[in-house]
Amino acid sequence: MGSERQVDFLLIGGGLASAHCAAELRKRGAQGSILLAGREPEPPYERPPLSKEYLRGEAGREDAYVNPPSWYEENEVELLSGTNVMSLDPAARTAKLQGGEVVSFDKALLGTGAMVNILRVEGAENEGIHYLRAYGNADAIRADAEAAEHVVLIGGSYIGAEVAASLTAKGARCTIVTMEDVALSRTFGEDAGRWFHELLESKGVTVHGGEELEAYEGDGRVTGVVTKSGLAIECDTVIVGAGVRPDAMLAQRAGLEVDDGIVCDAKLESSAAGIYAAGDCCSYESVIHGRRLRVEHWDVAMQQGMHVARNMLGDDADYEVVPYFFSDLADWASLEYVGPASEWDEEIWRGDRESGEFSVWYLKDGRVAGALSVERSEDLAEARRLLADRVDVSAHTAEIADPDSDLSAIGA
Ligand SMILES: Cc1cc2nc3c(=O)[nH]c(=O)nc-3n(C[C@H](O)[C@H](O)[C@H](O)COP(=O)(O)OP(=O)(O)OC[C@H]3O[C@@H](n4cnc5c(N)ncnc54)[C@H](O)[C@@H]3O)c2cc1C
């Protein structure tokens, strides 16, 4: 039987959402005790560098820490790294930590993040097959890729595209194998996806679209991949970027409502009063979109973590921030996106695809459902406003298409 103690705020999961929740609680003057328990050995850190600067060896581990390690003590936030929260009892308002300690709490945040989808195909036991979520994964990829003759990326979405770009920039030979015909088309559509696809190819990345992994080859160490259509590619390192799924295991075992993530209302509160969720694990009722939403974006985890802190302190407000995402393909292109558009019936290009400075607007029934920017960040501010306000822009499509027009008057 473990010992027992009481905290005011229990933050479960040592990622971005929990770290920003803790910081916002203190910023807002919360006096109560805060305990942040995370499974990973490091203090909360940013994951985006793992496929970018950190993978290329341009940044160290500490550069990605959300707060310096000393911040937690200075701000009286008890950080328990390397500590799994084993179970949660919403009715008793207690949680059991690895090692047996039972913590009772007043308010709790579930910031348990997401887990990578594992492809369990023949040959998956071979060495040299990687996934990317944590520092240790990035270290192992770096070590393998440095010595590799040929790296194959499975998946043509962000992780596949970013890692291919980073490793190519470091001199590796990379090939992407992706189920979609066009890389990055799942989010951005075929037209914009084609722009990124061709960019990758122009920089030396081979892309095989419309191909699904059938098996890995190798006898101890991976020597190749084979696709369902019979395409065989020799390689000595594989990195899989096949998406993630919300880590809602603790919530599910606790009897909270779980669907695609931990089901929350518009205030980010779960089916148990006083227990909230934020970040990759949170499926919330979006007032802006008029539907349930779960996204895996750095900015969303951060914003939601802070929002939960404010609601824990009594704000009791709906979460109404338009989700924002960014991605870098080495120093070849930076993209930003607001949305997410689940479907659209019109695409408007604003700017010049040849120069690599443009935005693409995704419209549904005359309203902005999403927008992508490549080097035109200023467009996104307008898109975000028009999306949030649900402005009917059908009479303004020519202005949107004109890269020199001022959009601030639309819907103002
Ligand atoms: C390689 C990579 C690159 C990315 N690049 C971008 C990008 O360019 N732009 C962008 O917008 N987003 C990017 N993302 C996504 C972004 O990093 C995530 O959306 C963000 O990290 C989510 O934060 P989180 O706090 O919800 O979850 P996480 O960061 O996943 O943190 C959750 C933590 O909780 C821990 N945990 C789970 N269960 C328990 C438990 N029971 N007890 C204790 N601890 C637990 C997990 O181990 C994990 O450490 C990237 C992600 C990766 C992996």
Image (cartoon, grey):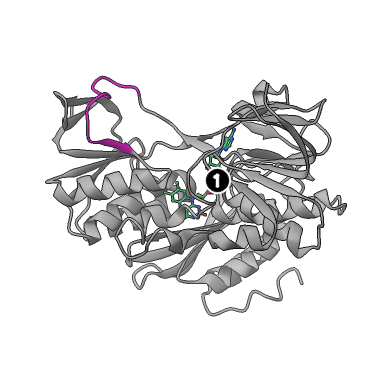
Task: State how many labels appear.
Answer: 1
Q: Hey, what amino acid is under mark 1?
A: Glu
User: Residue 211 or 168: which is nearer the viewer?
Assistant: 168
Residue 285: image quadrant is: top right
The answer to whether one can see residue 140 in this image is yes
In this view, the residue in front, 41 or 19, is 41
In the displayed structure image, the side of residue 187 where residue 220 appears, left or right: left
Image side of residue 80 versus residue 118, left or right: right
Residue 136, given in percent of the width and then of the height, sits at 36, 44
The residue tagged 1 is 296
Which quadrant: the C terminus?
bottom right
Let me know if residue 392 appears in the view: no
Q: Is residue 216 above or below residue 269?
A: above
Residue 346 x %, y %? 55, 52
- Residue placed at 54% from the left, 44% from the top? 81
Q: Is residue 254 magenta?
A: no
Q: Most prominent secondary structure in the magenta stretch?
A: loop
Q: Secondary structure at mark 1?
A: loop
Position in image of residue 353 (x %, y %): 38, 67
Pick the front one: 272 or 338 = 272
Query: Does label 1 point to a residue whose CB lies under 8 Å from ligand 1?
Result: yes
Taking the spot 36% from the left edge, 62% from the top edge, the residue there is 53
Pick the quarter of the image with the N terminus. top right
Q: Nearer the viewer, residue 247 or 336?
A: 247
Which stretch is magenta?
Answer: 120-130
Residue 126 among those drawn in magenta = yes
Crowd rating for badge 1 (residues with CA inside 10 Å; few <14, some 14–19, many 20+): many
- Residue 169 is left or right of residue 60, and the answer is left
* Residue drawn where x is 67% and y is 30% of the image: 101
